[in-house]
Amino acid sequence: GENVEQHPSTLSVQEGDSAVIKCTYSDSASNYFPWYKQELGKRPQLIIDIRSNVGEKKDQRIAVTLNKTAKHFSLHITETQPEDSAVYFCATPNAGGTSYGKLTFGQGTILTVHP
Amino acid sequence: GAVVSQHPSRVICKSGTSVKIECRSLDFQATTMFWYRQFPKKSLMLMATSNEGSKATYEQGVEKDKFLINHASLTLSTLTVTSAHPEDSSFYICSAMVGVGAYEQYFGPGTRLTVT
């Protein structure tokens, strides 16, 4: 099955700095790479995703980059704000068969943005 | 769009009783829903995949007789924790896949279960 490794497990930055979280995956057939943000006691929220036919995608202060050759994808947050503090999860889904869509999550990164 | 609700948000029950948690897709039909369990400061652990009109597929180590899943319609899946024990206390979250061919999943707000 798919194996997803996420680093770092914790990340502390000053407001205004950039934050980068990286995930590596094992299944070369993976073709969809979402990132979720989860605040304490709340649901995971999809913040950005990328498909394998694209190398980078941006949405305001958030971007995701994908390197299919190296099998890793990264979340980039620029100009961080205290409200960006949360746990961030990467994931990849199973592409087919009876487990279609089943997500394998990374271990999570606790991001703390200090004012 | 793509709103998923979950009910109840919190439940406290006594050991030995059963608890039912509902997951609904409010503005779309979901042929597939997923049930997760999350421990404090940990990642989401997939328990089972729920497909409308068929039996759920459970992950290894998850007792299907303990965690009953029913997906009777395209907008509703239920998880029943039977004969609950304190070790079943956890945060349970469902998600719904938007459609076949689309991987996007949207999560419910979660249910905090406490078994006393």
Image: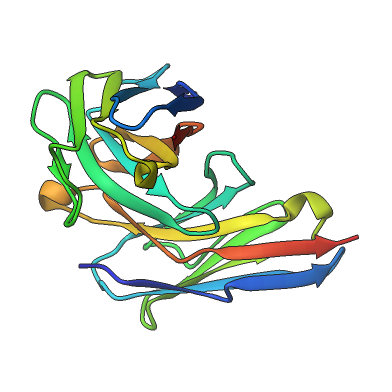
Q: Could you tell me residue A74's position as x and y percent?
A: 54, 70
Q: From this viewpoint, which residue is outermost toward the bottom?
A: A70
Quadrant assignment, res A78? bottom right
Residue at the outermost right position: A115
Q: How many marks?
A: 0
Residue A102 horizontal/vertical position (percent): 26, 50
> Is residue B89 visible to us here?
yes
| Residue A43 drawn at (x, y percent) | 53, 39
Relative height, residue B8 to residue A27 (above, below):
above
Of A98 and B7, nearer the camera is B7
Q: Residue B66 location in percent, x, y?
A: 19, 38
Q: What sort of colour scheme is used for the picture?
A: rainbow
Quarter assignment of residue A93: bottom left
Q: Is residue B16 above or below residue B90?
A: above
**Up-down: is A98 above or below B30?**
below
Residue at image point 79% right, 71% down: A13
- Residue, x 78% and y 49% (percent of image)? A83
**Between residues B61 and A3, which one lies in front from this camera angle?**
B61
At x 82%, y 55%, the residue is A81
Quarter holding the C terminus of chain B is top left
- Residue A37 placement, left or right of A61: left
Please report the residue visible at 39 percent of the width from the left and 42 percent of the height from the top: B86
Residue B103 in view here: no
Task: Judge from the rendering whether residue A86 lies leftward or rightward of residue A115; answer left or right.
Answer: left
Q: Is residue A36 above or below residue B27?
A: below
